[in-house]
Amino acid sequence: MTVKVLYFARLREELGRDGEQAELPAEGCTVAGLWENLHGEPPPQRLMTAVNQSRAGPDTPVRDGDEVAFFPPVTGG
């Protein structure tokens, strides 16, 4: 299964890339599982995500062909 992954803001800077194609072993993956598969650790607690441009949580399923975006929480002031 192939998923398009996008990184925004500080994550893009920290990881040194704005995205990647992820090959996952099988269906049944979640947003949290995708992050762990790519980075070898659970996602940060305050990480915000979207699947196919709709807000998603860590337990949101990820399917073949999906676009998953990761971004830090936005603050203002």
Image (spheres, rainbow, N blue to C red):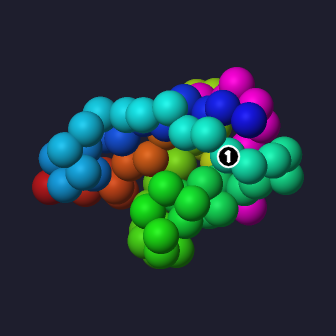
- Please report the residue visible at 57 percent of the width from the left and 60 percent of the height from the top: 37
- In which quadrant is the C terminus drawn? bottom left
Residue at the spot of label 1:
24
Q: Mark 1 Cα within 10 Å, few/some/many (few <14, many 20+)? A: some
Q: Identify which residue, 14 or 26, lies in the foreground.
A: 26
Residue 40 in view in this figure: yes
Residue 68 in view in this figure: no
Q: Identify which residue, 50 or 32, lies in the foreground.
A: 32
Q: Main secondary structure of the magenta part?
A: loop
Image side of residue 64 versus residue 31, left or right: right
User: Which corner quadrant of the image does residue 12 belong to?
Assistant: top left
- Please report the residue visible at 60 percent of the width from the left and 54 percent of the height from the top: 34
Q: Hey, which residue is sitting farthest right in the picture?
A: 28
> Please, is residue 65 above or below residue 30 in the view?
above
Image side of residue 62 versus residue 44, left or right: right
Coordinates of residue 19 in the picture (x, y in percent): 37, 34
Q: Amino acid at mark 1?
A: Leu
User: Which corner quadrant of the image does residue 51 belong to?
Assistant: top right
> Please, is residue 31 above or below residue 18 in the view?
below
- Please report the residue visible at 70 percent of the width from the left and 25 percent of the height from the top: 65
- In which quadrant is the N terminus drawn? top right
- Please report the residue visible at 34 percent of the width from the left and 55 percent of the height from the top: 72
Secondary structure beneath label 1: loop
Q: Which residues are magenta?
A: 59-67
